[in-house]
Image (cartoon, rainbow, N blue to C red):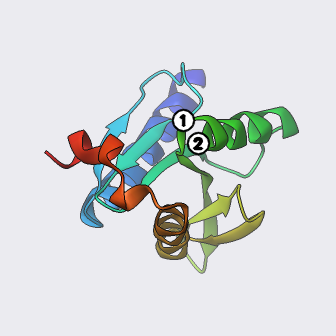
Amino acid sequence: MANRSKRKGSDFERKVRNLLQRKGFYCVRSAGSFGIFDVIGISKFAIVGLQCRLNFRISHEEICDIVNAFHRFGIYPGVAYRQKVGRKYEVMVYDACRHMHTTLDDFIMNAVKNFIRRGDYASDKYDWLLY
């Protein structure tokens, strides 16, 4: 049974990665969940980190860890989870900076707004990400 649940979790991580790639992000999936984030997406206008969960069960300490990654590294944090809508599951994201549940598109929009508000888009320190 453990193998089946692990497979479902890794399938969900791949789904989130593929959704971000369709939105124009370069994505890295951390297999085995050895880091804070399972999927990290990088684009010209935002860097997002997502912890992927099949359901929204996450401890307060884990939320604090991903928010600290935002303050230390500028990675916009979220928790991706599935929510049943009718007969299908939809990917939803808990935006850890704004403390709200939202769609993946709205999460990306908030990450871009934050990136621009912080002034990181004009900084030379991110030029290496664009090439």
Identified at 61% across, 62% down, the residue is 93
Which residue occupies the foreground of this view, 110 or 72? Answer: 72
Identified at 50% across, 68% down, the residue is 104
Q: Quadrant of the C terminus?
A: top left
- Residue 92 at x, y = what percent? 59, 66
Q: Earlier in the sequence, mark 1 or mark 2?
A: 1
Residue hosting label 1 = 37
**Is 124 positioned to the left or the right of 109 in the image?**
left
Determine contact: label 1, label 2, CB under 8 Å.
Answer: yes
**Is 119 positioned to the left or the right of 14 in the image?**
right
Mark 1, secondary structure of its residue: loop
Does residue 121 lie above or below 88 as drawn?
Answer: above
Q: Quadrant of the N terminus?
A: top right
**Is 19 positioned to the left or the right of 64 in the image?**
left
Amino acid, disc 1: Phe
Residue hosting label 2 = 51
Does residue 23 lie above or below 38 as drawn?
Answer: below
- Residue 117 at x, y = what percent? 54, 68
Amino acid, disc 2: Gln
Identified at 72% across, 33% down, the residue is 65
Q: Quadrant of residue 121?
A: bottom left
Identified at 52% across, 38% down, the residue is 9
